[in-house]
Amino acid sequence: MDKRIGAQYYTIRDFCQTLDDFEKSCEKVSKIGYKTVQLSAIGDFDPNDIKTILDKNNLKAVCTHRPADNYLNNIEKEIEFHKIIGCDVAGLGAMPYGEATSGSVKRFIEEFSPVAERLGAEGLTFAYHNHCWEFMKEDGRFIMDMMLGGFKSDNLKLILDVYWLAYAGINPAKFIRAYGDRLACIHFKDLKIDWHKQKFAEIGYGNLDWDEIIAACDDSEAKYALVEQDVCDDDPFVCLERSYKFLSQKGFE
């Protein structure tokens, strides 16, 4: 795994809706020490402008979350977008049909297999980001296994979110070791308990075993780790800095 820890921009999405704000956010992220980023939920910007701003701040885009309609209805433009910004993992943030069921998974496989094939032909990796509902069971099988089984192993990788694994009662490190060859990126996201509620937390401020998770990641085929915090109790940039400082003590830079 690349030890250049990344920032998932969903964490700072509210500060990335205009190009000026996006540039200011990139400056802050770079100043913290991050060297890679995932572009998710940002404004609809020209990819050339994105690349210019990233380069100016010594940041590399290693992953995206892009709208499902873009992949289905304008795949050539998406290929161009990823090539211009220099990003080889084309991500999808969630199942586009609402809840993940065997029926929606079947539709997903039918509609997105050609997308994955086309991206792969251009040297791009199609990757899916999980939540907890992929770990519901139908007829004794996880929805996740139905989905992965419907694609060639090289055509669908995962942007694996360890928070949602833990939320679903799945041990993150064990899952990473079992599915290591299907991983493109890992979302590092901690889980803390507030009375009876499970909440998002900065890395190292929650209950997940990061030594165990990092060791499993190092043995997997995941290329990049990206810090994400869906909801922050403090300024999102402060939260990103806390996570960065913790991970810098664990061998990341």
Image: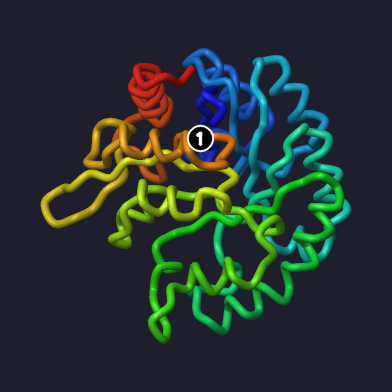
The residue type indicated by label 1 comes to Ala
Q: Is residue 16 left or right of residue 210?
A: right
Say which residue appears at 59% left-offset and 26% top-offset. 36
Say which residue appears at 40% left-offset and 68% top-offset. 135
To which quarter of the image does residue 146 belong? bottom right
The residue labelled by disc 1 is 225
- Residues 195 and 191: in front is 191
Q: Is residue 174 left or right of residue 127?
A: left
Q: How is the image coloured?
A: rainbow
Say which residue appears at 30% left-offset and 57% top-offset. 167
Q: Secondary structure at mark 1?
A: strand
Q: Is residue 200 left or right of residue 125?
A: left
Image quadrant in which the N terminus is located: top right
| Mark 1 neighbour class, 10 Å CA radius: few under 14, some 14 to 19, many 20 or more | many
Query: In the rendering, at what x and y percent does residue 57 appear?
Result: 65, 16
- Residues 64 and 147: in front is 147
Say which residue appears at 44% left-offset and 59% top-offset. 131
